[in-house]
Amino acid sequence: MLKHLKSLFRFSKTEINGSLFLFVLTIFLLFTPTVYRNYFGIDYNTFEEDERLLDSMINVIAISILREDTTEGNKLVDPFIFNPNDILIEDMMRLGFPNYLARRVENYRKAGGRFKSKSDLTKIYGFPDSLYRSIENFIDLPEAIVEIKEVKTERSMPSGKAEKVDEIDLNSETEYLVIDIGKADTTELKKIRGIGSSYAKRIVGYRQLLGGYTGLDQLKEVYGINDSLYQVFSPYFSLSDSLVLRQININLVSFKELNRHPYISYEQTKDILNTKSKNGKFRNKEDLFRLKSFDSLEVLKLLPYLNFR
């Protein structure tokens, strides 16, 4: 039996050499990735620097779009009386309108929008206050909208009977209807021409899914509201800065609740929970920027709806 076992487990010289070669090769392959990373790999650890760069780029874009301050692009160059309902793009630019703003006004008119009073111009998205102040006196529109009311009066008829007559009351003025989309219910929203029950329910429903609106441009994310409709509706909307958003505690939230948010996909939900399970709680926004399933713009959109307590 002993001789049989020795013959069974005995290695020839060739087998011993082959085994040694395989052992050395295995060790080499195991340590090759580590050696390569240490000597030839790129240590990418600039998340904070990338975030600062991205924030600066976003600020530059926002400033170029909104242009709240008076610049050469919106200086009153050649003042003249004009009606914003029929002025040409070239003439708007003569008045100091930036090209993007003149085209935004044109798109609003093409979509069926009308300016009824001077202040209606400021309801165009991104309209600078400084530009409005410089052209206000040249706008050929009333300061406010005159509301015509029918008043029933009576006058005597030859027969002695009284006849009811319609008269027009021109002494009543009303401001342009503007609704806060952060608070309005469906009944208030339907007061705006063009918004019926369907759009009103979608606007309120999407607000509830998000946890609140952070900007008017989020209306373009509501199903059925394209750019043209947004240009028509947006002058009638406002958004209060004092509104408090409903935030999600990213360290305590369930999979179902997290996946229900419009800005978080199914794959992103899995990535968040798997990362938390592996690395522990999210401490701050920098931890989100390290997730591979999100790009930087997606994180910036989502951050107002999260807390890290």
Image (tube, rainbow, N blue to C red):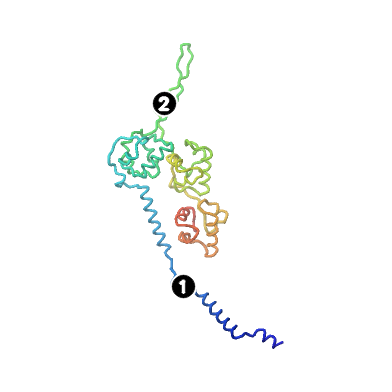
**Residue at image location 72% in from the left, 87% down from the top:** 1
Precedes in sequence: disc 2 or disc 1: 1
Closer to the camera in the image, 126 or 10: 10
Amino acid at circle 2: Asp
Closer to the camera in the image, 181 or 100: 100
Closer to the camera in the image, 280 or 230: 230
Closer to the camera in the image, 247 or 156: 247
**Residue 267 at what x, y percent from top left?**
54, 57
**Residue 228 at what x, y percent from top left?**
45, 41
10 Å neighbourhood of mark 1: few (<14), some, or many (≥20)?
A: few
- In the image, taking residue 207 as reference, residue 93 lies left or right, namely left
**Residue 190 at what x, y percent from top left?**
50, 37
- In the image, taking residue 295 as reference, residue 91 lies left or right, namely left
As drawn, which residue projects farthest toward the top? 159
Disc ID at residue 36: 1
Q: Quadrant of residue 259?
A: bottom right
- Image height check: is 4 above or below 279? below
Q: Quadrant of residue 173?
A: top left
Determine the secondary structure under disc 1.
helix
Amino acid at circle 1: Tyr
Disc ID at residue 169: 2
**Residue at image location 27% in from the left, 39% down from the top:** 78
- In the image, taking residue 96 as reference, residue 157 lies left or right, namely right
- Image height check: is 88 above or below 24? above
